[in-house]
Image: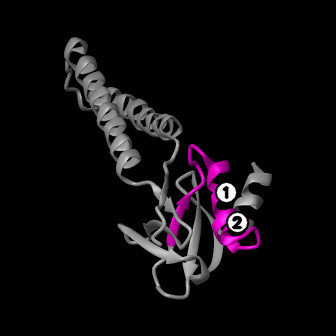
Amino acid sequence: MKSTAEPFRFSYWWMTIYCLGIGIGIGVPLVLVLTFVDDLMGVKVPGRILWPAIAGAVAGAELAGAFAVWLLWWFRPVYVSSECLVAFRSGGGYRKALWSEISAVRPVNFLGLRYLRLTSTSSKSSLWVPLYLSDREGFYWRVCEYAGPEHPLAVALQAQHSMS
């Protein structure tokens, strides 16, 4: 009997706000640098050209970022089934790890985004499970149901939940 895998997606709005924050964090210093470089170099670009150009570039980058987040949200869920977990590999792409193969789980903070990094006995590449899933509690209960509450992933999810 083949079990079906249940998808768990990251929180779209949380990730979008995160990306917008990065865009603003890049856009504001860019505006300041362009303003001061403009003054230092002696080349005067009229404000009626410079400011709309910068605003358009930042807005376009923000829209592209929101679209990229949507693509990742739609095409990159983490899957859980009674047999295994399917998640992102450290080198990109997906990989399946049977519950019995997951040997260690450790928390990782990558550019402010929190993940659990899973190592398995069957592969050298690790799996990355985002901790900003939209249904993290449902994910935890599904892991407990399929792998057991003593499984390293369930223990790590419970520890992360008590920390946040």
Instruction: State the residue in front, 96 or 131.
Output: 96
> SS class of the residue under badge 1?
helix
Q: Give the percent coordinates (x, y) of residue 138.
A: 64, 50
Badge 1 local density, few (<14 within 10 Å), some, or many (20+)? Answer: some
Kindly give the residue lying farthest to the front in the view shown.
1
Q: Is residue 93 left or right of residue 131?
A: left
For residue 94, the mark is: none
Question: Mark 2 belongs to which amino acid?
Answer: Ala
Q: Is residue 109 above or below residue 84?
A: above
Report which residue position mark 2 lands on. 154
Q: Say which of 87 and 42 sits in front.
A: 87
Sequence-earlier tag: 1 or 2: 1
Residue 106 highlighted magenta (yes or no): no
The residue lying at 41 percent from left, 38 percent from top is 26
Task: State the residue at coordinates (47%, 85%).
Answer: 124
Q: Nearer the viewer, residue 56 or 126?
A: 126
Residue under the image location 76 percent in, 73 percent down = 150
Q: Residue furthest bottom?
A: 121
The answer to the question of whether label 1 and label 2 lie on touching residues, with beta carbons closer than 8 A, is yes
- Compared to 78, does 45 lie above or below? above
Q: Amino acid at mark 1?
A: Tyr
Q: Would residue 145 be counted in the magenta stretch?
A: yes
Residue 83 located left or right of residue 30: right
Which residues, given as a range, are shown in magenta?
127-154
Q: Which residue is mark 1?
A: 140
Q: Position of residue 4 (x, y in %)?
A: 46, 62
Q: Can you tell which quarter of the image residue 50 is in?
A: top left
Q: Position of residue 163 (x, y in %)?
A: 78, 53
